[in-house]
Amino acid sequence: MFRRIREKSDGMSRSHQKVAAYMEAHPDRAPFLTAAQMAQLAGVSEATVIRFATYLGFSGFSEMQKHLREEIRERLTTVERLDLAEDAYPEEQRVVYEVLHDDLGNLQQTMHMLDASAFAEAVGMISRARMISVVAFRSSHALGYFLTFYLNLILENAKLIQQSDTMFEQLSPLRSDDLLIGIGFPRYTARTIQAIQFARNRGVKTLAITDSHGSPLAREAEVYLVATSRLPSFVDSYVAPLSLINALITAVGRKNKAAVSRRLKVMEEVWSKEGIYFPQ
């Protein structure tokens, strides 16, 4: 991206040079700004920023922003993300609307990136597995817990690896007809990648849920699914990944409808007898 800017710098107008100068001076912040925000900070019009993207050979600002984010996202630290959030959301009362808007964008991009054949293969892998182990550490733990809870509810064969220091001991009984699901988003945890490698070396099938085709989880897993988690803040956005996991659980339930229906009927009786849920 920045090489492209340097190659085209000789033919840039003065306004375009201002945009280029701002982007090169703020490489960690520019990818998460809107066209209007970048224009204000660079001292040009919004139309100039859009024309700048076209001048560089992109279809528009959104495509240029996507390339910037892909180049920079993996090396952002939590502290850097906290700093850039102040630029992206300058008005405190608008934060909730901006974040919701960004999450909608993540959902839309996830839909566009969805590999239907990989999704179908993932559903088949889950349905055929004798046992399912889920590895999801740190902030991804919530996604792993949600996936494991529902898979265990409908299939009765899923467990979440809770402790990273005993992870290999817990994974050692896995067999070739089992499945390991690794969930990881930037910043990726080394233990999750090691779990996928460990499973593959033992002939165990592996499935990854991650944020991009270039993710280290995607490179290691037999099959992987991608969900966008971009948010210009110090927290991760798991709206799209959770929606993808919801779709997985729903598809697995439909594929195994008869068995799942029997299982849920039994569980409803247990829940009712034991007073698990508050009466309506």
Image (cartoon, rainbow, N blue to C red):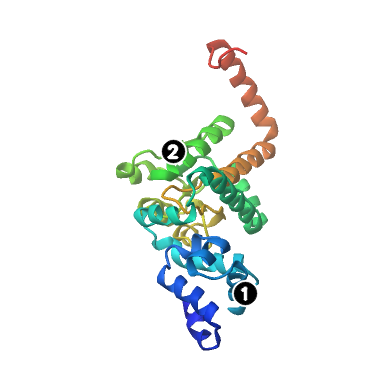
Number of residues whose C-alpha sits closer than 10 Å to that of mark 1, classed few (under 14), some (14–19) or many (20 or more): some
Residue at the spot of label 2: 160
- Residue 255 in percent (x, y) is at 68, 40
- Secondary structure category for the residue under label 2: strand
- Secondary structure category for the residue under label 1: helix
Q: Nearer the viewer, residue 32 or 106?
A: 32
Residue located 49% across and 69% down the image: 42
Q: Which mark is residue 51?
A: 1
- Of labels 2 and 1, earlier in sequence is 1
Q: Which of the two marks, 2 or 1, is nearer to us in this view?
A: 1
Q: Nearer the viewer, residue 6 or 271?
A: 6
- Residue 141 in percent (x, y) is at 43, 41
Q: Is residue 220 left or right of residue 151?
A: left
- Residue 95 in percent (x, y) is at 51, 45
Q: Is residue 255 visible?
A: yes
Q: Which mark is residue 102?
A: none
Residue located 48% across and 55% down the image: 88
- Residue 107 in percent (x, y) is at 61, 50
Tell me the amino acid under the disc marked 2: Leu
Compared to residue 144, the image places residue 108 above or below, namely below
In the picture, the quarter occupied by the C terminus is top right
How far apart are the two marked residues, 2 and 1, measured between alpha carbons?
49 Å
Compared to residue 263, the image places residue 16 above or below, namely below
How many discs appear?
2
Q: Is residue 226 left or right of residue 141?
A: right
Q: Is residue 121 visible?
A: no
Residue located 59% across and 67% down the image: 46
Tell me the amino acid under the disc marked 1: Arg
Q: Residue furthest left?
A: 165
